Image (spheres, grey):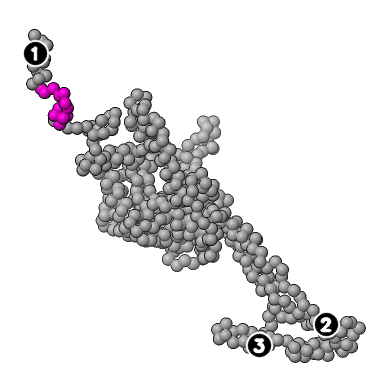
Amino acid sequence: MARLFGFSIEDKEKKSPSIISPVPQNNEDGVDNYISSGFYGSYVDIEGVYRTEFDLIRRYREMALHPEADGAIEDVINEAIVSDLYDSPIEIELSNLNASDKLKKLIREEFKNIKEILDFDSKSHEIFRNWYVDGRLFYLKVIDVKKPQEGIQDLRYIDPMKIRFVRQEKKDKKNDYMNVKMSSESDSSKIVSPEIEEYFVYTPKPSYPTGSIASSGGTKGVKIAKDSITYVTSGLVDRNKGTVLSYLHKAIKALNQLRMIEDSLVIYRLSRAPERRIFYIDVGNLPKVKAEQYLKEVMSRYRNKLVYDANTGEIRDDRKFMSMMEDFWLPRREGGRGTEITTLPGGQNLGELADIEYFQKKLYRALGVPESRIASEGGFNLGRSSEILRDELKFSKFVGRLRKRFANLFNDMLKTQLILKNIVTPEDWEVISDHIQYDFLYDNQFAELKETEMMNERLGTLATIEPYIGKFYSNEFVRRKVLRQTDAEMVEIDEQIEQEIADGIIPDPAMLDPITGEPLPPEGEMGMDAPNAITNGEFAQDTKKAEI
């Protein structure tokens, strides 16, 4: 077997051979194809799968060039990736991670390094579009083999048409521990946990996949280790064919129908728009050949073929070409009504676009974009959240799912970076990875309106529950359940309040009257200003008199 290119990250503690299963581990989408090797191995043809994926990717890219589809795609991308002059499109969120501040700081620094290597702040739109259209995204993680502790040095984009993922099943007679009896009565029933080798095959030239994997061993091109590639899919899989689909797949039929209906509309309007004439020419008792010759002479004599040249602005008489808007010339035998000229009217319903609008809406529905975004002349309503259309809410949730799926790109790169730099171990990463989240920059006005109304409702609830704080509810309970503040937000807010008190921006709550809310006077000034104030000496004398 050829040596794998790249690097692999392995756990220090390998799993015990007693952990067995007849079902192999499958962590990748749409990759459920195996090449069995060995004497008793059976070949599974997966070349058809890759041909299908090759054709699908080409189809998706052609669809993205259509104006209507491109408009819907741009709506999705603009909602998911927000470009701002001052803020980054994505930031890492570690509020749910139970770790030291030092570790969090290192994770934030490495995440920033990954974004700089990707140049994500300036190329975020292109990167997300490539993933959304193709349905998959590949990046090669380039490291210094001599100094792997320096981490990822470069991230290079790989065209999905040049790379494919292979899962190869190996059978080895030496692994007798993989065979376990299902029943004590029968020795023939056994569970076999196959050993799976996963790697990528990179072909520098994006050619149509031909040939047989059986003859080449599935190793055409360069074999790259799995850990050297960052692989993110759309999450949509055709379970029947085992192929990864793009979010554009559902819109293939709708887009083709829209194209055909638009082309047919153009042809119909060009052919039925002008009024054409029908000439019935009396040919008498002439023979067929003579009748045809006479008809041609009449046509050449009376036919007008005026052509307008848009380049020069000239009108010329061009009789060499036939068009579909020509008049009709029909011969008529003796005994008819003689020569006659009638007019064929043009189409009467040329202004109807209901069918075009229907298929446009169907295309937008297939792409998950609200139909209201088709009409460019329509206004934008910034009313209350109760007035928000259900389609916009569904669209917002759809974009949220896209963001969460796309964030796996940074998750895999961050994993490699932290492990190579010995910041965390592979075992530690499995624990902390579930608590690392990614915060995308958001500019959806509907979501902003929703958050504003939610904040107003929370403040109203807070005003109602405030008299019961300290009696039935604690401050921390109110901040968690009513105001919905996280631990990180509470720590940050407390620090900001302390700093603003120290800077004199807001008054100290200890110096305020709890009843009136007004500032309390200083201790020294309160006795001097009071008209009937008792000094310390007078209070002492009165106390002695009372004792006597």
Q: What secondary structure is found at the residue carrying circle 3?
A: loop
Q: Amino acid at mark 2?
A: Glu
- First in sequence: mark 3 or mark 1? 3
- First in sequence: mark 1 or mark 2? 2
Asked if the residue at tag 3 contacts the one at tag 2, i.e. Cβ–Cβ closer than 8 Å, the answer is: no
- Residue 336 to residue 411: above or below: below
Q: Amino acid at mark 1?
A: Lys
The percent coordinates of residue 541 (x first, y second) are 8, 16
Asked if the residue at tag 1 contacts the one at tag 3, i.e. Cβ–Cβ closer than 8 Å, the answer is: no
x 26%, y 54%: residue: 150
> Which residue carries the number 1 mark?
544
> Which residue carries the number 2 mark?
340
The percent coordinates of residue 403 (x first, y second) are 43, 50
The percent coordinates of residue 77 (x first, y second) are 46, 57
x 8%, y 9%: residue: 548
Task: Measure the alpha-carbon separation of dots 2 and 3.
Answer: 25 Å
Residue extent of the magenta highlight: 525-536
- Residue 334 to residue 128: above or below: below
> Which residue carries the number 3 mark?
318
Q: Residue furthest top?
A: 548
Q: Amino acid at mark 3?
A: Asp
Comparing 520 with 7, the one in front is 520
**Residue 518 magenta-highlighted:** no
Task: Measure the alpha-carbon separation of dots 1 and 2.
Answer: 140 Å
Numbered disc in front, either 2 or 3: 2
Asked if the residue at tag 2 contacts the one at tag 1, i.e. Cβ–Cβ closer than 8 Å, the answer is: no
Q: What secondary structure is found at the residue carrying circle 2?
A: strand
Q: Is residue 513 visible?
A: yes
x 83%, y 88%: residue: 291
